[in-house]
Image (cartoon, rainbow, N blue to C red):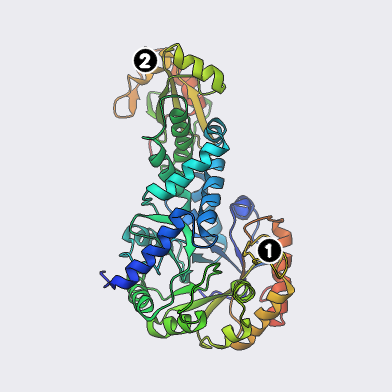
Amino acid sequence: MNVRIAADVASEAERRCQAVRRGDLGPYGELVRVNAQELVTTMFPRFTQHRGAERLRQDIDAFYKCFGATRAEFIHLATEFVRFMQPRLPPGIGRPLIEYEWMLFDVEVDKTPVPRPDGQEARRPTHVYLNPTVRWLATPFDLHADDQHAAQALLNHDAPYAYAIFRTFDHRVMTQRLSNHDIAELSSFTDGERLISPKESAHWFAHALAHELITSHHE
Amino acid sequence: MIIQGRGLGLRREFASSLANGPIRNDFDFLEVVPDNWMGLGGESMEQLDAIADKYPLVAHSLSLSIGDAQPLDMNYLSAVKTFLDNYDIAIYSDHVSMSRDSCGYLYELIPVRRTQASLQLMVDKIKAVQDYLSRRIALENISYYYDEEGQMAESEFIARLIDASSCGLLLDVNNAYVNSRNHGFDPHMFIDALPTDAVTYFHVAGHLDNGPQERVLDTHGTDVSAAVLNLGAYAVHRFGEQPIVLERDNNIPSLDELCEELRGIHEAMTGSTGNLQ
């Protein structure tokens, strides 16, 4: 599906788009930036709050001037913005925050269906699976702490905080902080599944099933 | 599936009630923006699946970037084709614009320089897209806020594009009106210059008008103005009664209010109240 592109058409199209990237071409330079800032602010509210409006405006400006976004759909501007920002953010809480908030979006739109949870009869399951949408995240601070406490945790070199982020059957996106016990139990899964022997305590499994971190159905 | 009558732009704000509520009869079809849905799972997919079971759909994308000077984005086009096929959508449209340069996407409908050379490239690309999608596509006249000397008139460019590529026209009546105000031409003459059999369907929307000294903005954030409705009636007189879609993307009222506005728009443009009760 090749089409021949005349050099003068290519240079003219390039000239107009480069003007937009610089912030020109009538109102278009500003329009794209306003639209991008609105989307980023909506999708990454905590990161936006941490970053501040002026620095975010500069980030968006640099995004247009320096970055080549490959995903066509406007909703994926957010993904492209994260790709742009990741190597540019200094050590601190900004990068974990934007990665976490992007992960919330990624889990929300994951195409894998989440099985319907069982009722009471599943309290003694024999075969369980990880929630198919689950992502793991380790951060150097508590995600629910404010910026000041998060920065202090970084300074103190606190032990990392581990989280599971997943979507429930009824489409709620959950962020579950994982305890050492959770991590130990989860590490016993192989390829996302695990058999439970009748001799094992089912307590942890029942709890994880109730929260839909794991499921007793495979789809 | 024959699309006719009154259509609404599908907004996420209404997705839940449309997916879960009873079938409504105050519109005939929905216009869905594939960019906002394709490739997404979870609640989005579940809702769209339910909506598609109840209502006919047309698709109107934003990122085909048919006017750019890059090879077609086959990843995007493939996703669009899958989307159209999955939901059995016959009518697909995008814009006479570009959204991309050699660096990447800009996420905006940027006006194309209207020359014979750019026209030829667009024709070649439209034909390739139509072959790939196995569908005749329609392209929308955009609202543009930047213009230069030494170009073809927009109406001539679009008319020649349609003639050479056999694509359809999604005539956005509001855009024609907004452009006429911002660039100083008669919108009736713009409509008169387009081929009478070109229109696949109409768009109508509201705009922001802060007076003669200010640029009129295509905001999709207000009710449709009387001037646009009058121009729409003129367009229906020229092109015949084609499906009409009301776009509303900002300051969104309730679905009931939108449907009531759509009823009035259809009546004002066609003289009839629509196909359904």
Q: Position of residue B53 (x, y in %)?
A: 53, 60
The 10 Å Cα crowd at callout 1, few under 14, some 14 to 19, many 20 or more, is: some
What residue does disc 1 label?
B208
Quote the CA–CA distance across marks 2 and 1.
59 Å
Quarter-of-image position of residue B264: bottom right
Q: Chain of mark 1?
A: B
Q: Residue at x 55, y 60 (%)?
A: A27
Q: Position of residue A140 (x, y in %)?
A: 43, 19
Query: Position of A16 compared to A195: left or right?
Result: right
Instruction: Between residue B175 and residue A193, name the one nearer to us.
Output: B175
What residue does disc 2 label?
A184
Query: Position of B226 compared to B79: left or right?
Result: right
Q: Residue at x 40, y 78 (%)?
A: B115
Q: Residue at x 66, y 76 (%)?
A: B275
Query: Position of B190 compared to B158: left or right?
Result: right
Disc number for residue B173: none
Where's the C terminus of chain A, which quadrant? top left
Instruction: Between residue B76 and residue B55, name the one nearer to us.
Output: B76
